[in-house]
Image (tube, rainbow, N blue to C red):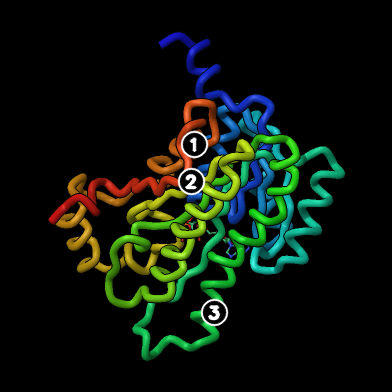
């Protein structure tokens, strides 16, 4: 395939992507992929130290990047961060809302505070970030929003009720944004990854029984690596994905396809 075609279709030169929870795991892998495709990267995570470390690793790959620490569940911090970024010439035209937390336990053992904490980070975090970047995207008539949902939005297993409910809410929020802002030149889509080897899933990776379940349930017979997921974000953020809107893309090795 001609390099010109790839650059024109999948290249992200001139784009600025804000990725939340980008210091590790899927977020960092997405930052590398978008950066390698030509975008400038804004790394968000909970601390300056985490952001700086990721920015240095991106810079070492020749990727232009800056860090902005904030808690996505705190609307005031999100608004202030996006305002500062804009003043400094780093106005995001791509948002990847990826930050997430987890609490695996049965409903009767789940505290209301822990349940709420998952909604605060996953759902309110996506709302806060979308709300902060949308006005500029609307003004420019151009923007891409990608939310990190999960296969848990579509199927469940014991012990993940709060997570599954939050990821289901994100799938619905994706459709709402897609229909509300599609007419303004802004697409919104979500990813539904299966089980990915990151620190998020260490407890599962260490369980033999879970590895056996994964081997039997995923037709590809293995864990995903973050690099299996990240290129889909390049697609959705690029010209190649310009007519994809309101879609929930499962990247799960066939997990949801199997009876
Ligand atoms: N790993 C999987 O199997 C899997 C599968 C489907 C979806 N996901 C989703 O992918 C996303 C990334 O997960 P991961 O596997 O890379 O995990 P991870 O723990 O490696 O990364 C999550 C990052 O989010 C950051 N974060 C947490 N709360 C935050 C907040 N309030 N504000 C800003 N940053 C915050 C963490 O510090 C961390 O760097 C999550 O939304 C997760 O639910 C993961």
For the N terminus, the quadrant is top left
Could you tell me how far apart the alpha carbons at marks 3 and 1 are, in whole angstroms? Answer: 30 Å
Circle 3 packing at 10 Å, graded few (<14), some (14-19), many (20+), is few
- Mark-to-mark CA distance, 3 and 2: 24 Å
Circle 2: element type:
strand
In this rendering, position of residue 95 left or right of residue 209 = right
Q: Is residue 158 above or below residue 70?
A: below
Callout 1–callout 2 Cβ contact below 8 Å: yes
Within 8 Å: ligand 1 and the Cβ of disc 2? no
Dot 3 corresponds to which residue? 116
Q: Are marks 3 and 2 in contact (CB under 8 Å)?
A: no
* Whether the residue under disc 3 has CB within 8 Å of ligand 1: no
Mark yes or no: residue 57 visible. no
Q: Residues within 10 Å of mark 2 (few under 14, many from 20)?
A: many
Nearer the viewer's eye, disc 3 or disc 2?
2
Please state the horizontal and vertical placement of residue 206, each as a whole percent of the image.
Answer: 31, 66
Location of mark 2 (residue): 189
The image position of residue 132, as x and y in percent, is 72, 54
Image quadrant in which you'd find residue 58:
top right
Q: Is residue 48 visible?
A: yes
Q: What element carries label 1?
A: helix
In the foreground, 101 or 143 = 143
Q: Name the residue under label 1.
A: 236
Name the residue at 37% across, 62% down: 153
Report how far apart the C-alphas of labels 1 and 2 lie in the structure: 8 Å
């Amino acid at each position: 395939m001609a390099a010109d075609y790839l650059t024109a279709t999948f290249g992200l030169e001139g784009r600025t992507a804000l990725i939340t929870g980008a210091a590790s795991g899927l977020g960092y892998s997405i930052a590398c992929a978008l950066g390698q495709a030509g975008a400038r990267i804004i790394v968000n995570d909970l601390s300056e130290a985490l952001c700086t470390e990721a920015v240095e690793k991106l810079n070492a790959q020749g990727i232009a990047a800056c860090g902005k620490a904030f808690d996505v569940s705190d609307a005031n911090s999100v608004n202030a961060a996006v305002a500062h970024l804009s003043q400094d010439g780093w106005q995001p035209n791509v948002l990847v809302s990826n930050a997430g937390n987890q609490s695996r336990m049965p409903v009767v053992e789940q505290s209301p505070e822990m349940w709420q904490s998952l909604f605060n980070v996953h759902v309110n975090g996506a709302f806060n970030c979308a709300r902060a970047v949308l006005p500029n995207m609307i003004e420019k008539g151009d923007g891409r929003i990608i939310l990190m949902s999960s296969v848990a939005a579509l199927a469940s297993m014991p012990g993940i009720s709060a997570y599954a409910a939050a990821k289901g809410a994100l799938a619905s929020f994706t459709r709402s944004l897609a229909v509300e802002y599609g007419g303004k030149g802004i697409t919104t889509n979500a990813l539904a990854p299966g089980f990915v080897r990151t620190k998020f899933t260490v407890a599962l990776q260490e369980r033999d029984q879970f590895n056996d379940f994964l081997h039997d349930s995923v037709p590809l017979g293995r864990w995903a690596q973050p690099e299996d997921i990240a290129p889909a974000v390049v697609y959705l953020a690029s010209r190649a994905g310009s007519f994809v809107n309101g879609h929930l893309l499962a990247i799960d090795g066939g997990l949801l396809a199997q009876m």
